[in-house]
């Protein structure tokens, strides 16, 4: 049974030790591109691990093909995402400032902050332009290190017949939801076939390489979608067993798929690689979001800019003077979002819920309105209706019981006019 279902049985330490001793190491395209997204320190640590495995590195031609088509974008991903965040911050600040102008706050404080944000934008734009300048020049440092690592270790260019055959197989696999790659079908609809079926083509190249070289494979990818990763109750359990089973049946060898974090962690255990916690933390950030999205903290931004302490103090005072939406409402909205997230709800509904939550979070109430509401509430609270004497209440209750027995509807006497006369026939009164 162990032999027949080998791919479905988790590997033990002995198997992992054997893999790390001899398996070919394959990185998918996003992992290679992350070398441009990492900080210098994390990049150096990651490259040091790869260099220790240099003799066993191998790159599918599909990875190289995708790498050079996406390299220019990856070089400026960090700057582009920071610019998006800064421009959103600037727009949000200008919207808030528009409501503050004309109050007691001095306008020049607001102008100082707007200028500080604009200076940061200019600074990041210059860094982006410098990276793009390097893209067009020979000897770009990161590319040179990648070229050295993979010199003579790249798969051959696929022949046209091979591509056509696997485009057709890829289409059939995607329709049947056979991993990997089918999760890309929607996002890459309309793309050229080599892009649309990229994950499957990479996988097929890996299988062919393992068969030809009689080699085990360690594949490193941060693709956490269901067409690569087995997930139960929201917990990722490792590579899809169908992938491991297909690989073993077609090659007679073993394959294991790691995230970048798991790869670096096991590199420390099996080949004594040195990887810092800072590098691991940065790897985690990139794993959570395929392209790094940087959150801008206004306090950090303002502290780093040329803004006076007095300006910071006044801005914080103005911020605290504008109460946010009632916190109980926010808790209820958050609970609703959590409930929606745990269910299989149409993504458009989830998007609408998130937008509503964001709108409530950013909404601010006019203090004058809040004061008016509070004053009205206090006035109502001050009203006290006098309590009737207990003996009178008992008499009224007794009267009601007696009238109920006579099937008479009780009512107060309102049929006497101001002059004491009984009402005329045309007047409204009791009709008993």
Image (tube, grey):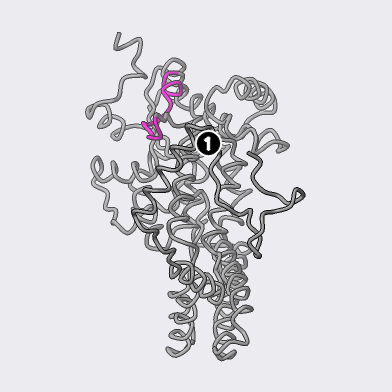
Question: Does residue 237 show up magenta in the picture?
Answer: yes
Pick whichever, 168 or 351, lies toward us. 351
> Going by the picture, which residue comes out furthest to the right?
426
Q: Is residue 383 left or right of residue 355?
A: left
232 relative position to 118: left or right: left
Question: In the rendered view, would you say 17 is above or below 4?
Answer: below
- Nearest the viewer among 348 and 329 is 329
Residue 66 x %, y %: 60, 43
Q: Can residue 222 be seen from the camera position used here?
A: yes
Question: Considering only vertical position in the picture, is 148 above or below 16?
Answer: below
Above/below status of 381 relative to 205: below
Q: Residue at x 46, y 40 (%)?
A: 339
Q: Secondary structure at mark 1?
A: loop
Residue drawn at point x = 57 percent, y = 37 percent = 61
Q: Quadrant of the N terminus?
A: top left
Q: Is residue 193 left or right of residue 252?
A: right
The answer to which image quadrant residue 176 occupies is top right
Foreground residue, 302 or 391? 391
Quarter holding the C terminus is top right
Q: Which residues are magenta?
A: 233-245
Q: Residues within 10 Å of mark 1 (few under 14, many from 20)?
A: many
Q: Residue at x 49, y 38 (%)?
A: 403
Image location of residue 76, percent across then percent down: 57, 61
* Image x and y of residue 283, in percent: 39, 52
> Can residue 153 be spotted in the picture?
no
Q: Position of residue 26 (x, y in %)?
A: 44, 37
Q: Is residue 264 magenta?
A: no
Q: Residue at x 54, y 57 (%)?
A: 358
* Left or right: 360 in relation to 6: right
Disc 1 designates what residue? 60
């Amino acid at each position: 049974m162990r032999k027949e279902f080998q791919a479905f049985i988790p590997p033990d330490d002995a198997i992992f030790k054997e893999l790390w001793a001899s398996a070919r190491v394959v990185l998918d395209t996003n992992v290679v591109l992350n070398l441009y997204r990492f900080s210098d320190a994390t990049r150096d640590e990651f490259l040091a691990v790869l260099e220790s495995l240099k003799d066993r590195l191998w790159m599918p031609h599909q990875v190289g093909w995708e790498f050079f088509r996406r390299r220019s974008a990856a070089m400026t991903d960090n700057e582009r995402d920071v610019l998006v965040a800064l421009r959103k911050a600037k727009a949000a600040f200008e919207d808030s400032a528009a409501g503050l102008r004309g109050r007691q706050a001095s306008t020049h404080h607001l102008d100082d902050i707007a200028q500080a944000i604009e200076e940061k934008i200019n600074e990041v734009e210059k860094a982006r332009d410098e990276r793009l300048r390097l893209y067009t020049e020979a000897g770009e440092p990161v590319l040179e290190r990648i070229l050295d690592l993979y010199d003579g270790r790249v798969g051959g260019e696929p022949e046209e017949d091979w591509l056509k055959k696997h485009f057709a197989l890829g289409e059939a696999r995607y329709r049947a939801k056979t991993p990997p790659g089918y999760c890309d079908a929607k996002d890459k609809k309309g793309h050229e076939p080599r892009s649309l079926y990229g994950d499957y083509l990479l996988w097929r190249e890996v299988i062919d390489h393992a068969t030809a070289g009689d080699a085990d494979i360690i594949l490193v990818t941060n693709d956490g979608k269901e067409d690569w990763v087995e997930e139960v109750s929201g917990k990722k359990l490792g590579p899809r067993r169908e992938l491991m089973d297909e690989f073993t049946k077609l090659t007679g060898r073993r394959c294991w798929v790691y995230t970048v974090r798991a790869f670096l962690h096991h590199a420390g255990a099996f080949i004594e690689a040195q990887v810092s916690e800072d590098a691991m933390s940065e790897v985690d950030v990139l794993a959570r979001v395929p392209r790094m999205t940087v959150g801008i903290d206004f306090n950090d931004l303002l502290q780093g800019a040329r803004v006076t302490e007095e300006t910071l103090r006044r801005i914080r005072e103005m911020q605290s003077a504008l109460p946010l939406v009632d916190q109980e409402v926010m808790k209820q909205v958050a609970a609703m979002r959590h409930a929606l997230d745990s269910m299989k709800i149409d993504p458009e509904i989830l998007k609408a819920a998130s937008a509503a939550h964001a709108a409530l979070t950013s909404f601010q109430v006019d203090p004058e309105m809040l004061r008016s509401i509070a004053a009205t509430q206090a006035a109502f609270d001050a009203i006290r209706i006098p309590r009737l004497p207990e003996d009178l209440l008992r008499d009224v209750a007794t009267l009601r019981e007696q009238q109920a027995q006579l099937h008479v509807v009780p009512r107060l006497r309102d049929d006497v006019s101001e002059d004491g006369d009984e009402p005329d026939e045309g007047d409204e009164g009791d009709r008993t």
